[in-house]
Image (cartoon, helix red, strand yellow):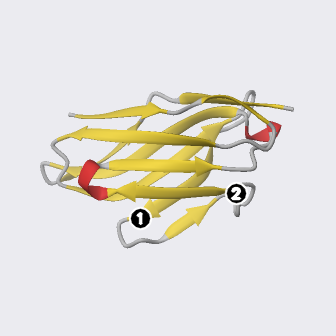
């Protein structure tokens, strides 16, 4: 069993910064990728950033140049540094990991953390 615990969300003003964390625990043998998604009110979930085990990083177009994803492999933790925040960044943010447990591949989601950007 793998558990993901997210932290770092909250209320921030336009132009401010926040850092989200997602710590994974359990019998993880390896991690293929660690990612962040978000779901704005009334909209579909969308990719924010994803970092693969080979170091390849992908960002959603709307966050390029403002958000940075990073990972601490020793702690099985992924971070999302968000800067120059805009009201349209308001959403529930979810971490997502693709991991190997007992030789099988699983996708796990965090519980979500609310980020609200005021104008």
Q: Residue at x 35, y 47 (%)?
A: 77
Q: Residue at x 68, y 37 (%)?
A: 44
From the image, tell me which residue sits under label 2: 66
Q: Is residue 53 left or right of residue 29?
A: right
From the image, tell me which residue sits under label 1: 52
- Out of 57 and 107, give the one closest to the viewer: 57
Asked whether the viewer can see residue 105, the reply is no
Asked whether the viewer can see residue 74, the reply is yes
Q: Residue at x 30, y 41 (%)?
A: 24
Counting other residues with Cα less than 10 Å from the Cα at mark 1, is it few (<14), some (14-19), or many (20 or more)? Answer: some
Residue 58 falls in which quadrant of the image? bottom right
Q: Is residue 18 left or right of residue 69?
A: right
Label 2 secondary element: loop
Q: Residue at x 47, y 49 (%)?
A: 79
CB atoms of marks 2 and 1 within 8 Å = no
Residue 45 position, x and y percent, is: 63, 40
**How far apart in space, not on screen, are marks 2 and 1 (Cα)?**
19 Å
The answer to which of marks 2 and 1 sits earlier in the sequence is: 1
């Amino acid at each position: 069993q793998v558990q993901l615990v997210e932290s770092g969300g909250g209320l921030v003003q336009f132009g401010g910064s926040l850092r989200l964390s997602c710590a994974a625990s359990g019998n993880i043998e390896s991690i293929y990728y660690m990612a962040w998604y978000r779901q704005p009110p009334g909209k579909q979930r969308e990719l924010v950033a994803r970092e693969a085990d080979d170091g390849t990083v992908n960002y959603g177009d709307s966050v390029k140049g403002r958000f940075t994803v990073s990972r601490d492999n020793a702690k099985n933790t992924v971070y999302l540094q968000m800067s120059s925040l805009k009201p349209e960044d308001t959403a529930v943010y979810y971490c997502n990991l693709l991991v190997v447990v007992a030789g099988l591949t699983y996708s796990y989601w965090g519980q979500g953390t609310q980020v609200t950007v005021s104008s």
